[in-house]
Image (tube, rainbow, N blue to C red):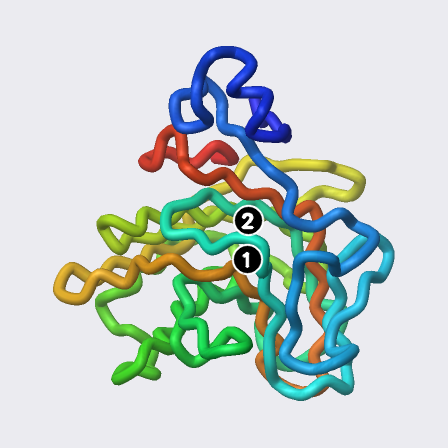
Amino acid sequence: MWIIAAFALALVAGTTPAQAADPVLVPVFDGKTLDGWTMHAKDAFVVKNGAIHSQKNASRGWIYYNKQQYKSFRWIFKLRQVSGDHKPTVLIWGKIATPALNGLGAIQFQPPNGGAWDYRPGHNNGGGKLFTKYPHPSWDVKKWAQCEILADGDTGIARMACCPLPGGAVKCKAQEVLKFEDKKEPAGREAPLAIQIHNKGIEDEYKDLVVESPVADPTKFITT
């Protein structure tokens, strides 16, 4: 069972969120405003039909959640691409450069089909063997999908599971599509969660964004 609640609910039961039997999933987007989010340029993102919507004419850039930074977390969200020529992208374990996020210091995941890029300083490449891509059907990015990213900052392992959402469905049974692991240079750092506009002309939408941190069970997806 997914539980979307404030941390206080776990405390009332006499446990901390990390000890709770079920994950405590906290919304990081209210579906109405961009309160708590910082974007690279004014009006690059708007709220449209209950989703964070990247503006077609915005330059390459990102929007990130500024209320908390995460090292180990579970991040679940829904997404689709309205228009564009590059797959939707999110950034994790990025680098803060005052006063904003530096998107070129992060690990990039491309939901829902498992593309990836390593933007860390000294890398800026496809990551090679650091990324493991698992076979799955090629899903239409123009249709809503659900994804879950499970990241362990202590080990530097981040995994993603996704699935297409049938019309009208609120969730689906995901399958793992991507894993990142760097044993020599653990990537996990406390950092914002971010959505990236990869190029001008792209319109992506994200909604129902929830996070669990700390993670009750960092080894298991809850959407698969």
**Pointers 1 and 2 in contact (CB under 8 A)?**
yes
Q: Which mark is residue 218?
A: none
The residue sitting at the front extreme is 98
**Does residue 201 lie above or below 33 as drawn?**
below
Q: Looking at the rendering, in which quadrant would you find the N terminus?
A: top right
Q: Which residue is mark 2?
A: 147
Please provide percent x and percent y for residue 159. Answer: 37, 50
Closer to the chain start, of discs 1 and 2, is 1
Give the alpha-carbon distance from disc 1 to disc 2, as whole Å.
6 Å
**Does residue 182 lie above or below 161 as drawn?**
below
Please provide percent x and percent y for residue 169. Answer: 74, 37
Mark 1 secondary-structure assignment: loop
Q: Is residue 186 left or right of residue 39?
A: left
Q: Which mark is residue 112?
A: 1
User: Which residue is at 44% across, 72% downward?
Assistant: 96
Q: Is residue 76 left or right of residue 179?
A: right
> Which amino acid type is marked by label 1?
Pro
Residue 164 seen anywhere in this rendered image of the structure: no
Mark 2 secondary-structure assignment: strand
Say which quarter of the image contains residue 64: bottom right
> Which amino acid type is marked by label 2?
Cys
User: Which residue is at 40% across, 28% downward?
Assistant: 18
The residue sitting at the top extreme is 13
